[in-house]
Image (cartoon, grey):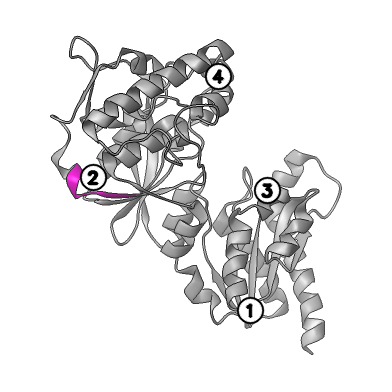
Amino acid sequence: MKAVIAMDSFKGSISSIEAGNAAAEGIRRVFPDADTIIKPVADGGEGTVEALVNGLHGQLSEAEVSDPLGIKITAKYGILPNNTAVIEMAAASGLTLLSDNERDPMLTTTYGTGELILSAIRNGCRDFIIGIGGSATNDGGIGCLQALGFGMLDDKGQQVSFGAKGLSQLTEINNTNVIQELKECSFKVACDVTNPLCGENGCSTVFAPQKGAKAKLIPVMDGYLRNFAELTKKYNATASPDTPGAGAAGGLGFALIYYLNAEFESGIELIMRETQLEDSVKDADIVITGEGCLDSQTAMGKAPVGIAKIAQKYGKPVIAFSGAVKIGAELCNQNGIDAYFPILRQVSTLEEAMDKTTAYRNLADTTEQVFRTIKLFKQ
C-alpha cells in the first residue's frame, strides 16, 4: 500500500509534519510494509516556513528585525535547497507578537517584514515565497518598502513615521536608495485574501478592527490608503487599489504587487506545487489529509479540500482526520473527501486535547482503527 499523507497543522497543537508522522505510524501498525509519503501542508499563514523547510529539507535562518512596534526581536525564515527564501510576515509583523493593549494599526509597521527580505537577499536569495497572514498592521506595506530603501517621504523630504500614522504624512515616493539586488528578485505571495485596498471591503473596514483600530479611525485610515494608492500611480502607472488581494495584510499586498512585482497565488496551491504533491498522488492507493477542525469553511477551499481535488483528478480515495468536527463538515463529502473522522478519544478539556503528546497519540490511534477497517475489506 502506498499512502500519501498531506495533513495541515492542528493549529496550536501539532505541526503539519508531526500530524503526518502520527498518521503514518497508525497506518504502519496495520500495514507494516506500507509506503507512507508525508508531504508538508500550509496555506501561507502560520506554519508555512516550518512545513516547507521540513518537507523540502531546507534550513532555518535568523535575523534581528523590528516587531510591529519597532522593538528589536529575532525572527526566523527558511531557505530551501534551491535557495528560495520562505518568509512568514507574521514572524516579524504579526498580531500575536503584541498584547491586546499594544494593538494599534496607527502605529504598527511592516518594517520588520522588509528586514526579513533584506536578510534573505544578503544571504544570496533572489526567489521568495511570502505568506502574509496574521498581520498586526494597516500601513499599506510602506514599512516593508522603507526597509528595502524606498523613500516614503513627508513634506520635509524625511522618511515618514511607522504605521498608518506614516501614511497620513506621506507626500512623495521615490526609489533612489532601493537596494540594487531587489531588481534581481522574484516574489510569490501565498494568500487567499481577495479584498481590495480601500472601501467597504478594504483592509481598514474589514480587518483593522481586529488589529485594535478604533471605529472612528476606520474611515480616516481608509482615506490615508487612498492617498497612498494615488501617489503610487506616479511610481507605477498600473497601480489600482481595487486589485484583488491589495488589501491583504493591511495593504502589504498592494505594496508587494506594485513595488516588488509580486505574483499572488492561493496558498495551498502554491505549497502543493512547490512540494510536488501531485506527482506523489498519481500512483498512490489512498490519500490522507486533515486539519485541526473540519467545518463548512474547510469545504470552501481550505487545504484538505485542495488536496482532495488533486486526489479526485486521479480517482484516489481520500480520508480526513481532524481534532474536531463541526456543523457543516458534511460539505466536505461533496468536495472530494470520502470520509472524515474526529480523533478525540475521550471527554477532555480543550487544553488537554491540544496537548502535543495527546494529539499525536490520538491521531495515530484513530488512524490505526480506520486502517484496521480498511484491512478487513482488503482480505
Q: CA distance from mark 3 to mark 2?
A: 37 Å
Q: Earlier in the sequence, mark 3 or mark 4?
A: 4
Residue range in magenta is: 182-187
Q: Amino acid at mark 4?
A: Gly
Which residue in the structure is indicated by mark 4? 212
Q: Earlier in the sequence, mark 2 or mark 1?
A: 2
Which residue in the structure is indicated by mark 3? 297
- Frontmost of labels 2 and 1 is 1
Which numbered tag is attached to residue 315? 1
Confirm whether residue 167 shows in the render.
yes
**Identity of the residue drawn at 51% across and 36% down:** 134
Label 4 crowding class (10 Å Cα cut-off): few <14, some 14-19, many 20+? some
Q: Nearer the viewer, residue 257 or 186?
A: 257
Which residue in the structure is indicated by mark 2? 121
Q: Percent x, y for residue 99?
A: 55, 21
Q: Is residue 287 above or below residue 201?
A: below
Label 1 crowding class (10 Å Cα cut-off): few <14, some 14-19, many 20+? some
Q: Percent x, y for residue 56?
A: 41, 63
Q: Amino acid at mark 1?
A: Gly
Q: CA distance from mark 3 to mark 4?
A: 25 Å
